[in-house]
Image (cartoon, rainbow, N blue to C red):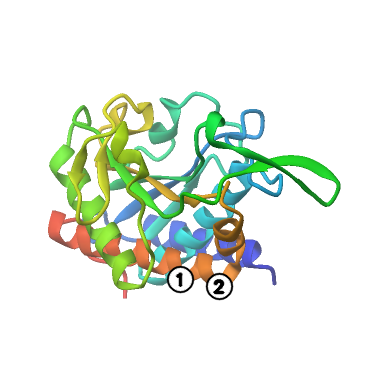
């Protein structure tokens, strides 16, 4: 059975479990959004892979890690066809938390040309690392920041190194855990849920691109994200995970 098939089976099992228990006994629900779409696939990596493909791979791992913790995870935009950003949070209206998975790039003026497997592409090896974003305009900014900080702290404990490159344009919300304010992001403020946007790393960096594409590294990062979310939900008072 493929990893995707296993994830879908686990998700179906979780959905069945939700339908078979009273609402007060349901586990917490997390909406895991795959950033960008098939038509607007985001940045292109140093080796020519779309950001959407990176986002979907990591989102699957995050959902699987959450489900393994007894948390009901629902993938949003898995088929890459939800074009309207305001519709992303609406896809799981009963969720307790929303996280949008992305991968970072650099400004066009900082890119350098190179040829890989006969393709003319570009790269920048000067920047690497993850970062997180929350919005003052989210209806629950304190809860959003709590979750973002929990995720960032856990990732650093696992050895993932954050970046400060986004601080030039976005003020710090929590510098120690690499969380920034980004108020006008639609997926963060057009929702009733605590919401976080996660940038997993810089796919224009040739070394980091390979790490971000490595399944073992993806699973380890997903484990950190899921652990941070679980801790945050517990503090927020969300329903306890299903044992």
Image quarter (top left, top right, bottom left or bottom right) of the N terminus: bottom right
Q: Is residue 50 visible?
A: yes
Which residue extends farthest bottom? 243
Residue nearest the observer in this picture, 238 or 167: 167
| Residue 76 drawn above or below residue 170 | below
User: Seen in the image, is 64 located left or right of residue 182?
Assistant: right
Q: Name which residue lies at 81% across and 43% down.
A: 119
Residue nearest the observer in this picture, 154 or 202: 202
Residue nearest the observer in this picture, 84 or 12: 84
Q: Which mark is residue 216?
A: 2
Q: Name which residue lies at 17% across and 51% down.
A: 146
* Callout 2: SS: helix
User: Seen in the image, is 102 located left or right of residue 138?
Assistant: right
| Residue 102 drawn above or below residue 109 | below
Q: Are marks 1 and 2 in contact (CB under 8 Å)?
A: yes
Mark 2: few, some, or many residues within 10 Å (few <14, many ≥20)?
few
Residue 168: x percent and y percent? Answer: 30, 35
* Callout 1: SS: helix
Give the residue pinned by disc 1. Answer: 220
Q: Which mark is residue 185?
A: none
Image quarter (top left, top right, bottom left or bottom right) of the C terminus: bottom left
Residue 100: x percent and y percent? Answer: 41, 43
Residue 158: x percent and y percent? Answer: 35, 73
Q: Is residue 20 visible?
A: no
Which residue extends farthest right? 118
Residue 2: x percent and y percent? Answer: 69, 68
Count the marks: how many? 2
Mark 1: few, some, or many residues within 10 Å (few <14, many ≥20)?
some
Q: State how far apart marks 1 and 2 are (Cα).
A: 6 Å
């Amino acid at each position: 059975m493929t990893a995707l098939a296993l994830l879908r089976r686990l998700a179906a099992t979780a959905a069945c479990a939700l339908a078979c228990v009273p609402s007060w006994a349901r586990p917490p629900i997390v909406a895991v959004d795959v950033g960008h779409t098939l038509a607007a696939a985001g940045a292109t990596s140093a080796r020519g892979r779309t950001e959407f493909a990176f986002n979907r791979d990591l989102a699957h791992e995050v959902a699987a890690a959450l489900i393994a913790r007894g948390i009901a995870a629902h993938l949003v935009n898995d088929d890459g066809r939800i074009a309207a950003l305001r519709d992303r949070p609406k896809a799981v209206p009963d969720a307790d938390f929303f996280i949008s998975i992305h991968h970072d790039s650099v400004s066009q003026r900082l890119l350098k040309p190179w040829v890989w497997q006969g393709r003319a592409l570009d790269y920048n090896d000067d920047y690497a690392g993850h970062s997180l974003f929350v919005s003052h305009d989210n209806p629950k900014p304190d809860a959003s920041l709590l979750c973002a900080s929990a995720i960032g702290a856990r990732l650093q404990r696992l050895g993932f190194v954050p970046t400060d490159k986004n601080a030039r344009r976005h003020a710090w919300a929590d510098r120690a855990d690499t969380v920034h304010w980004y108020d006008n992001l639609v997926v963060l403020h057009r929702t009733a849920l605590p919401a976080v946007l996660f940038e997993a790393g810089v796919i224009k960096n040739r070394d980091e691109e390979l790490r971000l594409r490595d399944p073992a590294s993806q699973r380890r990062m997903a484990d950190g994200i899921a652990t941070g979310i679980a801790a945050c939900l517990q503090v927020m008072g969300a329903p306890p995970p299903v044992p």
